[in-house]
Amino acid sequence: MARPLDLSLTALAPLVWGSSYIVATQFLPNLDPLTVSVLRALPAGLLLLCLVRQIPHGHWVWKMFVLGALNFAIFWSLLFFAAYRLPGGVAAVMGALQPFVVIFASRFLLGSPINVLSLFAVAAGVAGVALLVLTPEAQLDMWGVVAGIAGSASMAFGTVLSRKWQPPVSALTFTSWQLTAGGLLLVPFVPFAPTDWSTITGTNVLGLTYLGLIGAALTYIVWLRGIRIIQPAATSILGLLSPLSAASLGWIFLDETLSAAQSVGMIVVLMSVFIGQYALRSTPVSTKPPLFAVQKT
């Protein structure tokens, strides 16, 4: 079974991702999702590339663009589209379906067995997220639902392929390649974004800096490290902590209220994460990679 320290470190990523809602609404209300995605991924990726001073070669080039598309370009674009078309709670439930896709994708791409208890844990987690974030007024929009499910599937396959395609580099370098590729894929669409760049403020810069350096670069370093040393399905289940984090931060910083049902949802989510980790416990099959080793060619 993965060590508690490894699980705790990997869990930091979705806990930090839960803060994206507050940052987006409080620091970036005048920026559109595409602009935010580009400015979140590309500068952070290029900064890490300057640090590691190593670029992919051969077949790793197209593989990094595939991973950059799945984990960033496609995922973030569909995630924001779903968030705009759906109430936040519905979008969060769509995102919580991701571990289901990871479990079945791992079976077909990695040969991992499907554990019935893990499916139960994910189902319970989705129910917990629904209790936590859904309201009676929540309405469904067909295209929003399609985007939410497709976005979850995109990152799910990105998670599994990040385990299947393991370049002989550190997690820092692996993250820099994916972030840069994902950002570059979004650049051609920037001219179609509605944001007026002359309206960007210092507050926007602070929010983008946090989302890029902390919410993308740092968190994906530990996330990709977790994918390498923990089963992708077990790592993905930790993603259920993201809506829990978002609700908790909203309660603490935005004076949002928590109902009894939401409190029950939090408990259910936490229990599902623990049950999922127990169900998917296994001996790590790979050597633990360094987080921040800088390698030169």
Image (spheres, rainbow, N blue to C red):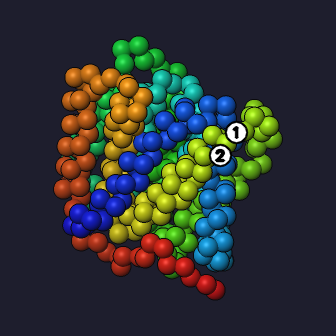
Residue 124 position, x and y percent, is 24, 37
Label 2 crowd bin: few (<14), some (14–19), many (20+), radius 10 Å: some
Q: Quadrant of the N terminus?
A: bottom left
Q: Give the distance between the C-alpha atoms of the residues marked 2 and 1, in whole angstroms.
A: 6 Å
**Which residue is under mark 1?**
201
Pick out the residue farthest to the top.
137
Quadrant location of the C terminus? Answer: bottom right
Instruction: Give left or right: position of 291 versus 185.
Output: left
Q: Quadrant of residue 263?
A: top left
Amino acid type for the residue under numbered disc 1: Thr
Rendered location of residue 99, percent (x, y): 36, 47
Q: Determine the residue positioned at 27% across, 65% down.
A: 5
Toward which corner of the image does residue 78 lie, by quadrant? top right
Is 29 displayed left or right of 168 in the figure?
Answer: right
Q: Nearer the viewer, residue 282 or 12?
A: 12
Residue 110 seen in the current view: no
Residues under numbered marks 2 and 1 in contact, where contact means CB atoms less than 8 Å apart: yes
- Label 1: element kind: loop
Can you name the residue that lies furthest to the front here?
202
210 up-or-down from 291: above or below: above
Q: Residue furthest bottom?
A: 297
- Residue at 55% across, 50% down: 210
* CA neighbours of label 1 inside 10 A, class few (<14), some (14 to 19), many (20+): few
Q: Helix, strand, or loop for circle 2?
A: helix
Residue topped by disc 2: 205
Residue 159 x, y percent position in the rendering: 45, 57
Q: Is residue 91 above or below residue 121?
A: above
Amino acid type of the residue tagged 2 in the rendering? Val
